[in-house]
Amino acid sequence: MKKIIIMPMLLASFIVFSQEKIVTKSATITLEASVPSFQPVAGTNSNVTFVLNPATGEVASLALMKGFEFEMALMEEHFNENYMETDKYPKAIFRGQIEDFDIKNLTEDYKDYTIKGKLEVHGKSKDISASAKITRSGSRVTLISDFEINASDFNIPIPALIKYKLDNKVKIQIIAVLK
């Protein structure tokens, strides 16, 4: 009899906890490592999973590295094979916390926040802090974040032959519309 009662309660608790988070599987990450006077080096991935727990301000994101598309096919090939080694390191993961986040304080006007967490790329983890602008319209929450990382912090090799064309500082922008 106890099993009959416990199973539905356990199932109901999973349903309640799963409804706490808001998710998108179509967030966009744009990265750029361009050097002035040379061909722009920028890639975009529009199939990024982004999760927000509105009760706690916790966020998590997962991007498959092969999902980045570049203007030139050769850039994309070099990105996947020579720099990011996507067969060996297929994904980038971020787990963090939005500081002082309270979903009840969100309006249709963007508010500034700081997100602190751990970014895992190319087999390395690093603590990062990023600024973010967040707004809410009805049940939709939009988050925009811009930050920079150093490729060298993640042991991403930049061959000496092209160091003058590719910046070690990689600018990253994330746009997530969560429902």
Image: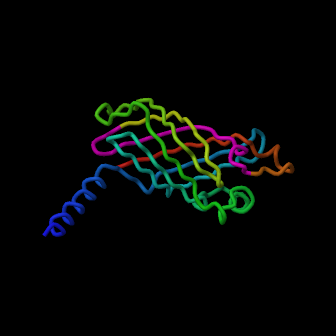
Which residue is located at x 65 percent, y 49 percent? Answer: 42
Q: How many marks?
A: 0
Q: Nearer the viewer, residue 171 or 21?
A: 21
Residue 125 falls left or right of residue 107: right
Q: Does residue 29 lie above or below 105 as drawn? A: below
Furthest residue in direction front, as rendered: 2
Would you say residue 14 sits in the magenta stretch? Answer: no
User: In the image, residue 131 lies at what x, y percent?
Assistant: 51, 33
Q: Nearer the viewer, residue 9 or 62?
A: 9
Q: Does residue 27 lie above or below 138 as drawn? A: below
Residue 39 falls left or right of residue 20: right
Q: Quadrant of residue 123?
A: bottom right
Q: Does residue 145 lie above or below 105 as drawn? A: below
* Magenta-drawn stretch, dominant element (helix, strand or loop): strand
Q: Quadrant of residue 147?
A: top right
Range of residues picked out in magenta: 136-156
User: In the image, residue 46 lies at what x, y percent?
Assistant: 51, 55
